Each structure stands twice: as C-alpha cells, then as structure tokens.
Image (spheres, coloured by chain):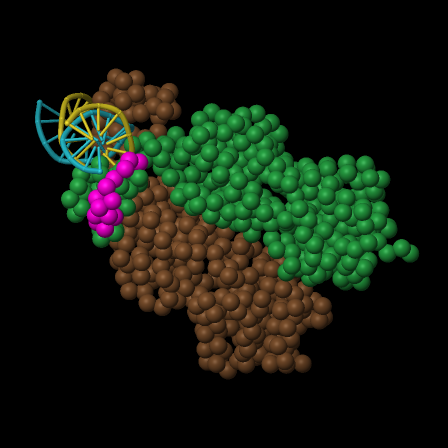
Chain colours: A green, B brown, C yellow, D cyan
Amino acid sequence: MANIHDVARAAGVSISTVSYAISGKRSIAATTRRRVEEAVLALDYRPNAGARMLKGTRTNLLALSAPLHAGSHGPAHMAFVLAVINAARTFDYDVVLLTQDDATSGLRRVASSALVDGIILLDVSQDDERIELVRTLNVPTALVGVPRVTDELVCVDLDFERAAELSVQTLAAQGHTQIGLVGQDPLIYERGSNFPHRFRAAFEAEALRLGIDAAFVPSRENTASVRAAVDELAAELPAMTGLILHCNEPVQSMVLEVLDQRGIRIPADMSVISACSSFDTVHLNPPLDVIPLPASDTCGRAVALLMEQLSTGVEPRVELLPPTLVEHGSTAARQRV
Amino acid sequence: MANIHDVARAAGVSISTVSYAISGKRSIAATTRRRVEEAVLALDYRPNAGARMLKGTRTNLLALSAPLHAGSHGPAHMAFVLAVINAARTFDYDVVLLTQDDATSGLRRVASSALVDGIILLDVSQDDERIELVRTLNVPTALVGVPRVTDELVCVDLDFERAAELSVQTLAAQGHTQIGLVGQDPLIYERGSNFPHRFRAAFEAEALRLGIDAAFVPSRENTASVRAAVDELAAELPAMTGLILHCNEPVQSMVLEVLDQRGIRIPADMSVISACSSFDTVHLNPPLDVIPLPASDTCGRAVALLMEQLSTGVEPRVELLPPTLVEHGSTAARQRV
DNA sequence: CTGAAAGCGCTTACAG
DNA sequence: CTGAAAGCGCTTACAG
C-alpha cells in the first residue's frame, strides 16, 4: 500500500505538501495540487487510518451502541442502525457497531482506546445504564431517545407525546368518542423503554382532556395475543370506532387481519391510525394513515448534533421532532347510527 | 486519558516493560507484572488504538459488508450481523459495519486506509461485485455464502443442496409422493442470490431422483401472495401431502394461517418442514420441524477462518456445514386413503 | 529479566 | 507557496 512518501516522491514535492494538498488546510499552487492529485490517483493512495488517529485529530469513526433487547423488533432496529450509518457517511464517518448485552464494556473499550470520536446511543431506556457511563467517558455523545434524567445530555427523538395527542385529536375531530390503543410487547414496557410509556401516558391524558373514552392494551407478536388484545378493547369500549396502533409491523398487520375476520371495515366501521411507525404503512391491507417515525430524521439529527459537538460544541438539549400525519384513507368521520 | 508513559511512571518501569507485561510477549518477573497491572487498573489505561494500528500489527477491527437488498428480510439480516459481531468479540475484534448500496467503495476505503485487518462478506450473490474487489484488495476475507466462482476464496455456508435433499428424503421416507416448495420473494431469485437457487435446484433434482411429484412457487411477504402460492401448489399437486417452506418467518407464519383457513391439519393432512430458517420455529403455530440455518455457526466459522488467515494462513476453500433436521411434530407418515 | 531507542505514517506548527 | 522536523503512542528488535 502506498504511503505519503510514495506520493510525495511521485509528485516531486514534500510530504507536508501532500498532506496539505489533500486536507486543503493551506493554499497550494494549482499546478502542485494537480501533480499531487495525479499521484494520489495513480498510486490509489489513502492516508493510513492509524496514523491519522494517532495524530490526535480525528478517527473518523463513531460508535453506535444498539443493544438488542428482548422484545426488540428486528426490522425497526435495523432501520435505525442503517439510518445512523447513512448519516455518518455523509460526514465521512464509519461506524463501529456495538450490540453485545454488556453494553457498557464495549463503550468503555472503544472510547478509552480513542478508537472513536463520538458515540450514538440507540434505544435508550428511562434509566439506561449507558447514561452514567457516557457522562464519565468525556467523549461526545448523542442519544436517540430520552432517558428520565437528561442533564448535560444531547437527545433527539420524535415527540411521542405530541404524536399521541395528534392521533387522539384527529380521531376526536372526526367524531369518534371511544378510542382504543394497541401498544407494544409488554416486555418493552417492563424494560423501561421510554417512548412507549410517553406515548401511552399522553394518549390517556389527551383522551381525558377531550372527554374521549380510552382503553389501552399491549400485545405480543402472535395471532393469539393480537386477537385477545382486540377483543379486550372491544369489551372495554363497546362503541369503539377509533383505533390507534402503536406497535410493530407484524402486529399491525395481524390487527388488520383480525378486524377483517370480525367483519369490521376500515374506515367505514373503524378509523385506524398507525402511530410512530418506522415502516411503510401503504403496504398494509388496507393502507393506514400514519404518523411516521422517520429513523433517518431522528438518527440523522442525532449524528448531526454529534458532529457539531466535535467541531463547534453544542449545548446539552432535548430535541423533539414534531410529528406529522400522513393520510392513506384509513380514517373517516364517524357514522351516525 | 492515561498513556503508556503514565503507566510506566506509576509502576516504576520502562514503557517496553509495560507493553510486554500487557501483551505477554516476553517473560516478566511476577512482582513487576503485578506492579504494572496495578498501575493499569489505577489509571484505567487502555492502549491507544491508533498507535497500535500504526505499528502495523493489528487494528483489531474487521469490516462487515452487509448490503441491504430489495427483498432482504430485516430480522434474518440482523441475526447474521449480530452473529458476526459476537464471533468477532470472542477474538477481541470490533466490527465496522458497511451497509451502503455502493458496497465496493466502502470496502475499498476501509481496506486501503488499513483500518481493518480483515473483511467478512455477507449475503453474497452469484456474481457479486464485491468478489472482484476483494481479490485485488489483498486483505484477508471470508464470505458467508458461495458465489459462482470461488477460486482463491474462503467461503462458508450451510449446505443448501444437502438441506433440500434432506427435506425431500424425510418426506419421501414418510410416504409422501407429492411435495410442494414455497420459496423466497421472487426479487431474491432475480437478484442472483445464490442459496435460493441452490436449494430449489437440489429440491427438484432430488424429487426427480426419488420419483416424487414436485412443484415450486416463490412468494412475497403478504397474505394475498401467500394465498396465491398455496393455491398454485394445490392446483399443480392435487394430492400434495408434503410441504417445504424455504421462506422468511412472516411468510411461513402466513402459510400456516392459510392452511388453517383451508381446514388442512398439520401433520394429519399435511407434513410441513421449515427449511434453512434462521429463526425459532417452535413459536409458529403449530411448531414446525426445521432444518436450522444457524447464523451463529456459519458466521462464527467465517470469522474463525478469517482469524486463521491473519495468523497461520488458510488455504482457499468452500466449507459447507451439514444440515440437520430438528423435529417438532409437524411431519408424519402419509395417511393411506 | 529489563531498558533505551527506532520507527510505524501521518499532521502541523515553525521557518523561509 | 513550500519544506524540514517534531511528535502523536505504541511495539519490537537490539543490548545488556
């Protein structure tokens, strides 16, 4: 593999000129620059990553902590990982993926060996063990998700409270007076993941505020559990005509299947909103109105804030992205009976 | 962050002694070693990753190329990524995950900057563009999957041909004479992914050899497509009593749902085998006999062979792991009518 | 059993 | 506009 000396020799310049020509950190005569560029191309030169790291500038590597928990949903998980990697690449960063159960030891390892310039934490729970660690690590960090205590942290997430309110308001404005919510796997609530709680609490508060009868049930990812969940909602809310789905893709799909089996038509008999979904709801049958959870937006913003920390610095903050509702015809004004 | 000089000072030894005490590459007096270990612990010292890389020994980083294609199945994909990371960690390696569409540029980047010691290629297609690249890169590489031309490559995979034969043989031995195969998403066949073709071809060849009537249909991941697939098989094989599922988890689940709706009981009316599945089929309803596709085995073996290349060297080879059948009661001898 | 020193390949003040 | 040189933090022959 060619090194900077090879390039310098080929271009007939010193190694500092090569370095500056590549980094652009000082002005170079146009002809010199061209000669260097040609040599770089001819030798397929790329600066040695270790040497760059050692000089203490940038490693161009960031750590992505994405532990896989019980109840996590593979595709959604993957979507966030991909979103972080794509965002990182736009800043010329590569990503070291840490997934081991023992999340803190991996972070400690890559941070204290100065392997990475920064850290992205995914799937943050309310009392996440990683929070305390990154406080001590002194490595720039951005979280996707909001823990209970956010002091000194940079956090990005969809505004789940607003999303819940928007869901309820939309259905309430259409005249629905009994609204059900199918939630995530119970495991996810138990583990202290923050967004399901935030969504559920805001759902119930907003329903109360608007005088809506509301009921919530979690559901596991299997047909029996989904069927039981739907039946439980129907029992609690006999006149339910509005349904909010805050669960993963297979569960949403199963809910629609169960409604179909029960002869419940969408939106004639039931208005359905898919809330905070990181997949495309037009592939569902029928396509669902959706408040998207855009992995690329939240992760992109988190990566951007991380990059800002590396350069200019960033004040600690919690950024909540405003939810929007995209209609696909699965809600309608309530039929008067 | 403490460096090796800090540790040397704290332990009252030279930096070379610190280095050797940590690496164990030469014998050290027990008391000296203890002093060094204490200093390392006290200062929370970890060698600088860049400096290690620069010395040209090991970066302790490997690149995982896992492009996400149309038709890829999220959870299965994730399972393989996780399996590689877990295996890498057992060798004290971290993983840089490359997922961009432009797979070759990422590999070129991390390889020629000497960021990684080796490369794992996932989801290899028959004429994968990455193959030619890694041949020129001169970086140890192991593939999970088998391309059309395997010269000079180290490849690991489940033996899909044997798996197909084992599926057919098992059902044939039970007296089934008409056997259907539900395959992957058509996109996956079009893209030239190798294992679906290998499985399908071996399925048809083995059926022919045993005098079994066989039919194959691909299926997309939606209920309508699955229903159509099942009906097509039933039309082609009116006396079908054996069914092999070589498709992702949701599709397998939908097939079972459709069979249930059609009043077809498992295994009384239909013996079903889940082939090369990377998920747990006991959660299906009913649980299915399965030939597992153990991501941890194939990926673990690929990583192990990569590590061998880094030390002793490895002859190019194609290692096909033998399939096994795990019974869960979804097959039975054919009912004579 | 241990230490002094070279050198990995860069980046960046320092000089001109 | 360009070059010579220091130095980042290690590992590893070389010496003793």
Give the side of residue B151 with respect to residue A70, left or right: left
**Which sits in the foreground, A113 or A60?**
A60
x and y, in percent, of residue B222 in the image: 63, 64
Give the side of residue A246 with respect to residue B11, left or right: right
- In the rendered image, the vertical position of residue A219 relative to residue A27, given as above or below: below
Q: Residue at x 50, y 51 (%)?
A: B78
Q: Residue at x 34, y 47 (%)?
A: B110
The residue at the far right in this view is: A337
Q: Residue at x 67, y 81 (%)?
A: B337
- In the rendered image, the vertical position of residue B19 relative to residue A42, given as above or below: above
Residue A39 lies within the magenta run: yes
How would you classify the magenta stretch by its main secondary structure?
A: helix
**Which sits in the foreground, B20 or B323?**
B20
The picture quadrant where one finds residue A270 is bottom right
x and y, in percent, of residue A49 in the image: 30, 40
The picture quadrant where one finds residue A69 is top right
Q: Residue at x 24, y 48 (%)?
A: A34
- Magenta region: A25-40
Residue A228 lies within the magenta run: no
Where the N terminus of chain B falls, by quadrant?
A: top left
x and y, in percent, of residue D9 in the image: 29, 28
Give the side of residue A312 with respect to residue A113, left or right: right
Work out whether residue B284 can be spotted.
Answer: yes
Work out whether residue B160 can be spotted.
Answer: no
